[in-house]
Amino acid sequence: MPNNVPITAGSGTNIATEEVGAVHYQRVKLIDAVASSTLALNVVEDQASASGDPGFVLMARRTASPTNTSGLDGDYEALQLTGGQLWTLWRGAQDSAGVDMTDTVNHALQTTLVTMPQVIGAVAASGADAQAPVKVGMKAIDYGTTTTAVSTSDVTDWFADVTGIPFFIGGHPNVVTLEKSYTAATTNAVYATLSAVGGKLVVTQAQACCEGRGDVRLGFGTSTVPTSQGVVLSHPRISTGDWVTRGSGEGVVAVGAAGEALLITVGTPSVGSIRVVTTYYPIQS
């Protein structure tokens, strides 16, 4: 317990002391001049705090860019901060070059994640992918909803109905529709070809209509219309005013090999012409 020991100095003065083992130690106040106030420096781990507990103001050195202020590893030095925030090093989090990210980078990352939640893939476009997939969600809309158009290259929603069934439009954004008319026999003629070397043609629909009786065979090849594998459309005798069709344009009907054109062979129609219409698009192989 603290003890006041009388000290004779003129009329006498009391000195505040702490008696430990019959020895008096002078008390030193670290906070204010109130006799009953104390500052506990011997707080133990997991000790409960209380309202009004006194303490020290903890300050650190303001540093725009943190650097060592001591001479050797293991020396004591002051904590450093900027903008009221303590500089830290986020160990274990690294950038794409394998360099530890400082707190400045972390702040920018945290700000982005808080203001605009996003998932960034680990593999760039056209990169080899060996990552686990990310589950994809969609925006539910009612049937009859008119969606809002966005600008080219903007991010857009992927829509599904309220039961989670996604909306799809079959085909390709650059589908080519081609019609050619034949009034005489033609053998192994080029119906459609590729503009890019090494590409492939993908057919989504093929249709032939005859004014008079006639035959037609359409297929992939480099010089000759195939008679088995590679045939897209074939009929040995289309009746007058009749037609033959394959596919609806919503899905893939046939795909040619790299560098193959779409070739055609037709017989001479008995009347008028044979008209052949196809929808297709080119892809890189």
Image (cartoon, rainbow, N blue to C red):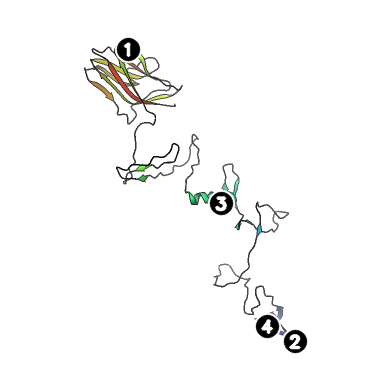
Q: Earlier in the sequence, mark 1 or mark 3?
A: 3
How many badges with numbers are in the image? 4
What is the x, y in percent for residue 45? 58, 67
Q: Which residue is mark 2?
A: 12
Q: Residue at x 32, y 15 (%)?
A: 265
Circle 4 sits in a helix, a strand or a loop, which is it?
A: strand
Which disc, if any, is residue 107?
Answer: 3
Q: Quadrant of residue 16?
A: bottom right
The alpha-carbon separation of the residues under discs 2 and 4 comes to: 16 Å
Task: Determine whether 184 is above or below 229 in the image.
Answer: above
Q: Earlier in the sequence, mark 2 or mark 3?
A: 2
The alpha-carbon separation of the residues under discs 1 and 3 comes to: 71 Å
Q: Which residue is mark 4?
A: 3
Task: Determine whether 221 is above or below 283 in the image.
Answer: above
Between 105 and 151, the residue placed more toward the observer is 151
What is the x, y in percent for residue 56? 63, 68
Q: Earlier in the sequence, mark 1 or mark 4?
A: 4
User: In this rendering, does residue 190 appear at all?
Assistant: yes
Q: Which residue is mark 1?
A: 186
Residue 153 is left or right of residue 236, and the answer is right
* Circle 3: residue type: His
User: In this rendering, does residue 21 appear at all?
Assistant: no
* Circle 2: residue type: Gly
Q: Earlier in the sequence, mark 4 or mark 3?
A: 4
Q: Earlier in the sequence, mark 2 or mark 4?
A: 4
Circle 2 sits in a helix, a strand or a loop, which is it?
A: loop
Circle 3 sits in a helix, a strand or a loop, which is it?
A: helix
Question: If the image is split into quadrants, where does the C terminus sit?
Answer: top left
**The residue positioned farthest toward the right in the image shown:** 10
